[in-house]
Amino acid sequence: MPGKRVLVLRPDELGPNDQKMWREIRTESGAPANPFLDPAFTVAVGRVRPGARVAVLQDDGSPVGFFPYEAGVLGRGRAIGLGVSDSQGAVLRPGIRLDARRLLRVCGLSSFEFDNLEAGQGVFVPHAVEELASPVVDIGEGFAAYTDHLRAHSPGFLRQILAKERRLARQVGEVRFVYDARDPAALRALMEWKSAQYRRTGRRDRFAQEWITRLVGLLGESEEPECRGVLSVLYAAGRPVAAHLGLRSRTVLSWWFPAYDRAYAKYSPGLLLQLRMLEAAAADGIETVDLGSGPARYKESLKTRDLRVYEGAVVRPVPGRRGDGPQGS
């Protein structure tokens, strides 16, 4: 990378000016303000993952790009927060050209794995092996405009959800929704429901991994406007029946950890919660709810369009055996 200097830092070594420049570059690029690509997410991951690093690209002493990643054994790199991050990649000033393998060499990496690389990441997209659809819900024009879209594209869907909400109130008790709840008991219930769902469906239980549980706790307590957790809870007769922990910026809410009490499955409490959450988010200035990649029938019913994300890896041939280098975990 001629004419440029690259510093490899731990996330907690990023100064206020670095974070300011990171956000300015994201804004300048025109990319969605996805909270997973905000510096606060990388800093939070750095508190729970010792291999977290950021390559800071400088031109004449000024940052022109940031590449967050995690370094593991034998120089194997991965996207920051891989496994729970729904938007990945480098943050580069428009016009910056990089060679992916050369960037890896500077970082002391032999490879870099990603599974939710955002579209427009010209450095890494050529190394993708799969393109995935990531459905989103556009609510920037308000919830009424969105429900008009629902009625036009998913006839009967909205009517069925609202009928189930009335039935839940009638058969169980008063239905109440809280968009931004500060309810530790509801968060614990959410994590228990989600763990049970992972085990039931044969998937790895994310909440059995300490670093993920700690990361969720950190982001759930965050007050950072560009990257903080939002716990939304649907109550019936005073008890939680569905909950969702999302990650939000000022304009984007990422659908992250949803779950519900299976004892109330016949009322579709997850869909009830999602509909009420979309209504509250629209009133709170959210323009886009990113439902994340992965097939699910409810996403097809709720979405207004798809984004593209990519899965793959950059591999750099390294002669002989190589250790982690100074930035390994």
Image (spheres, rainbow, N blue to C red):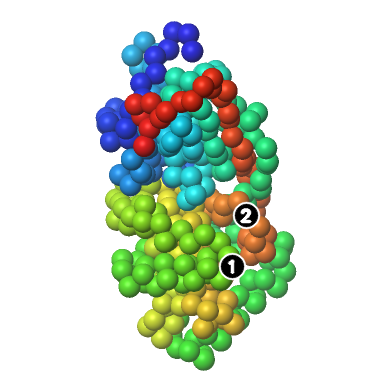
Horizontal and vertical percent position of residue 104 = 49, 24
Asked if the residues shown at circle 1 and circle 2 are in contact, with their CB atoms under 8 angstroms apart, the answer is: no
Residue occupying image coordinates x 60% and y 51%: 293
From what the image shows, is residue 81 above or below residue 89? below
Under circle 2, the secondary element is loop
Horizontal and vertical percent position of residue 317 = 57, 23
The residue identified by callout 2 is: 294
- Mark 1 vs mark 2, foreground winner is 1
| Residue placed furthest toward the top | 3
- Please give the name of the residue rendered at 66% of the width and 45% of the height, measured from the top-left corner: 132
What kind of element bears circle 1? loop
Q: Is residue 9 above or below residue 265?
A: above
Q: Amino acid at mark 2?
A: Gly
User: Residue 131: image x %, image y %?
Assistant: 68, 41
89 sits to left or right of 328: right
Residue drawn at point x = 31 percent, y = 68 percent:
184
Q: Nearer the viewer, residue 302 or 50?
A: 50
